[in-house]
Image: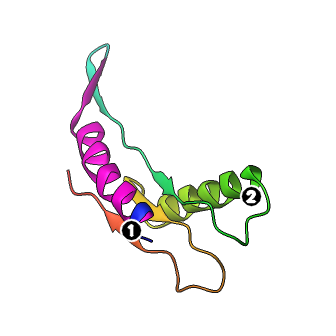
Amino acid sequence: DRDVTGVQTCALPICAAVGALRVPAGTLSLQVTISVGVTSMDPSMLNPEAMIKAADQAVYAAKQAGRNRSCIARPKNVAAPARAAVQV
């Protein structure tokens, strides 16, 4: 659990840095954001593809929670995913 929490801690400043960027597009200045899904291999995951699927589901959870966030995927028998918002 400390590993995924540590990765989420690293993801938050990355989300903030990307959100602070302005991308010039002609006469416009666009803002972009990222959503990050975090997980680690769990005994319930039978192969690496299961871990990738869990991280992918966490990305979608982060997007549904408001984008520009990170979300931790946890095994089904553990509490709901933790979400962290990034303010830019």
Residue found farthest to the right: 46
Residue 1 percent coordinates (x, y): 45, 71
Q: Which residues are magenta?
A: 4-24
Secondary structure, mark 2, is helix
Q: CA distance from mark 1 to mark 2?
A: 20 Å
- Dominant secondary structure, magenta: helix
Disc 2 designates what residue? 50
Q: Indicate the amino acid at tag 2.
A: Ala
Q: Residue at x 72, y 51 (%)?
A: 48
Q: Is residue 84 visible?
A: yes
Quarter where residue 59 is shown: bottom right
Q: Are marks 1 and 2 in contact (CB under 8 Å)?
A: no
Residue 5 falls within the magenta-colored stretch = yes
Measured as percent of width and height from the top left, residue 63 is found at 49, 58
Where does label 1 land, which residue? 2
Q: Which residue is located at x 63 percent, y 76 percent?
A: 75
Q: Position of residue 86 (x, y in %)?
A: 27, 57
